[in-house]
Image (cartoon, rainbow, N blue to C red):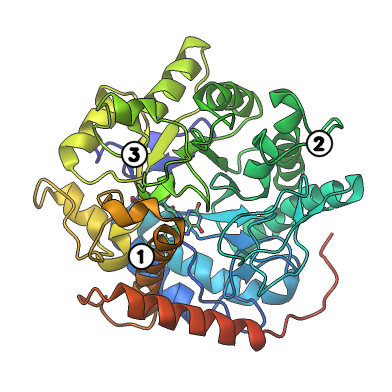
Amino acid sequence: MNIATTLELPCSVRLKSRIVKAAMSEGLADHHDRATEGHCRLYEKWARGGAGLLITGNVMVDRQYLERPGNVVLEDESGLAALRAWAAAGTIGDAQLWMQMSYPGRQCPKLISKEPLAPSAVPLDLLGNFAKPREMSEGDIEDVIERFGTTALLAQRAGFTGVQINAAHGYLLSQFLSPKVNQRKDSWGGSLANRARLLLAVIARIRQRVGEGFPIAVKLNAADFQRGGFDIKDSCQCALWLADAGVGLLEVSGGDFEHLRLLGYRGDPETAEDPAVAQGMVKAGYFTDYAIAITTALKNEGKAMPVMVTGGGRSREAMKYVLTVGGVGFVGLARPFCTTPDLANQLLRGDGASVTFSGSSSTGGETHHGLMRFKTYRVLRVQSEVAWYARQLKKLAAGHDAESSSSLALALIKHLCADMSHSMSRKPPTIAVAK
Ligand SMILES: Cc1cc2nc3c(=O)[nH]c(=O)nc-3n(C[C@H](O)[C@H](O)[C@H](O)COP(=O)(O)O)c2cc1C
């Protein structure tokens, strides 16, 4: 078996290769939070580029709470025509296009909300960019569940071939799973079963709305890498519940805005030790060994849900190892697709042993010099890298090539200015939510 082997998921959808373009927030929405021609251009490039599956960046289920300005919002039928064009472009050449749906919880910047919602009023400690959240009421929780159902139904109507629920990286559903952020005393907090209740309720509501056979995927943290936080044992248990809930594909990542393991950064002295890193076990990316552990737990219990691992995978040999020895179903890649949109075709053709792409001066994970011990430096460093890649997405979407320069500071300044100006000129429409 290799990266070119097709695989049929239990939901009967066949993916034409084992390479997946993982979610990247595009920041390309118009001032009504709708998809644009930029989305179509970008996704057509990626669809022609050979990946079996393209997962969109965060599409928000509630326009009051975005992860960043420029997010597409899907809560009613107002932007359906633009979404149809996006779905058509992203499914060219038999590519699957799944919409990632997300609710930010406390990871909603002050620029968007002065009072975001979260499981408990535990603030995000990130240079004062995020306001203290308000603890969600039962009504707020029911509203979120319903919103995910509505967004999924609209995505299906628009022609997306599946949906992915973002329950990773410290967004709302991941906050509920975390014993550190979720300090609720009711039936939504406490035991792991209670903390996972919201994610499972969201899956059930989506299934009710989209019917059988439509792929529902989940992106889940292998761990959040905080002492006393969500760990790999919790993740394995959640994977079993997700399989029972009919999830078609489980993507494994890790970390959150405070602990950016998802990009390979390990400079945070406050985080729990990562056993895989400590034992030199990281063979093919940041979460390979975790994904193998989850795959094994599923197999041991006779569950057929395929697993995909995302983060730092760069060599063809390593990918082969993940698929053959590890039994993992798919490899997700994100940053390389910002500069090399036909990356999957290159890998499938066998051009070179490794993924070579013109990244920023760091490709994540390799930057562990002394300054990384200082939180302000660390946060700015990581944000500049994300900004650099986000700018490359905008260039591709505008029909240009990605740039080869690596001025991270300039990228961050331009990115922040663009976000600020976008948020000031947003004109969200007011149309009733579709039933
Ligand atoms: C610019 C940028 C935007 C991202 N946006 C999202 C997102 O919307 N949803 C998500 O789940 N992950 C997002 N990620 C994380 C990626 O999906 C992926 O987990 C991470 O980049 C590690 O994979 P890589 O090493 O192949 O880049 C983003 C990453 C980058 C660089």
Which secondary structure, mark 3? loop
Please state which amino acid type lies under the numbered disc 1. Glu
Tell me: residue 337, above or below residue 17. below
Please state which amino acid type lies under the numbered disc 2. Arg
Please state which amino acid type lies under the numbered disc 3. Tyr
Residue at 53% across / 47% down in the picture? 169
Ligand 1 within 8 Å, label 3 CB? yes
Does 6 sit left or right of 99 as displayed?
left
Residue 312, given in percent of the width and then of the height, sits at 30, 46
Ligand 1 within 8 Å, label 1 CB? yes
Which residue lies most toward the left here?
Answer: 352
Say which quarter of the image contains residue 64.
Answer: bottom right
Residue 311, given in percent of the width and then of the height, sits at 36, 45
- Residue under numbered circle 1: 385
- Residue under numbered circle 3: 286
The quarter of the picture showing ligand 1: bottom left
Quarter containing the N terminus: top left
Residue 187 circle label: none
Residue at 41% across / 28% down in the picture? 290
Please tell me which of labels 1 and 3 falls first in the chain: 3
Front residue of 411/289: it is: 411
Residue 184 circle label: 2
Which secondary structure, mark 2? loop
Does 195 sit left or right of 253 as displayed?
right
Does 238 sit left or right of 143 as displayed?
left
Q: CA distance from mark 2 to mark 1?
A: 35 Å
Front residue of 280/205: it is: 280
Which secondary structure, mark 1? helix
